[in-house]
Amino acid sequence: MPWILLTLAGLFEIGWAIGLKFTDGFTKPLPTALTAGSMVISIVLLGLAVKTLPIGTAYAIWTGIGTVGTVMLGIFLFAEPVTAIRMGCIALIVTGILGLKFAA
């Protein structure tokens, strides 16, 4: 169960990171509210997950999920560049996430 909570926390981290783009500097009320809600949910789920998971592992995985997801959505939603170096770095992050998950 803590791994599910951690995964959900990471997904909500992606939501708030992408949501920031839509808030227009926090001037749009609905995107701002959804982004803030995603932030709270993400932190609460992370807090629940670290009750049983090691904090270093959980935090690294949480940020890794958020990083990879945000980069991938940035590519698809905002036409951010796709380069071999960026994709290689994403592969390294994914490898690190998997390594931490299986080492925990």
Image: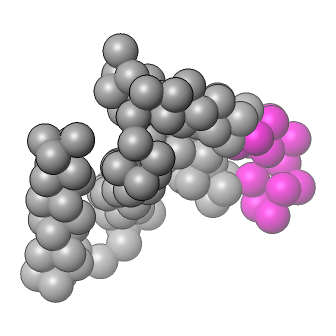
**Frontmost residue, 99 versus 75:** 99
* Residue 64 picture quarter: bottom left
When asked about the image quadrant of residue 60, the answer is: bottom left
Q: Percent position (x, y) of residue 62? A: 42, 47
* Quadrant of the frame with the C terminus: top left
Task: Identify the residue shown where x is 21% and y is 51%.
Answer: 100
Regarding residue 20, the answer to whether it shows in the image is: yes
Total marks drawn?
0
Residue drawn at the location 61% of the way across and 46% of the way down: 16
Q: Which residues are magenta?
A: 23-36
Q: Looking at the image, is 33 positioned above or below residue 22?
A: above
Left or right side of 93 for 28: right
**Vertically, is 60 above or below 62?**
below
Left or right: 7, with 98 as reference point: right
Picture coordinates of residue 27, whole percent (x, y): 88, 55
Above-or-below relation of 19 to 5: below
Tell me the quarter of the picture where residue 34 sits: top right
In the image, what residue occupies the spot 15% across and 46% down? 103
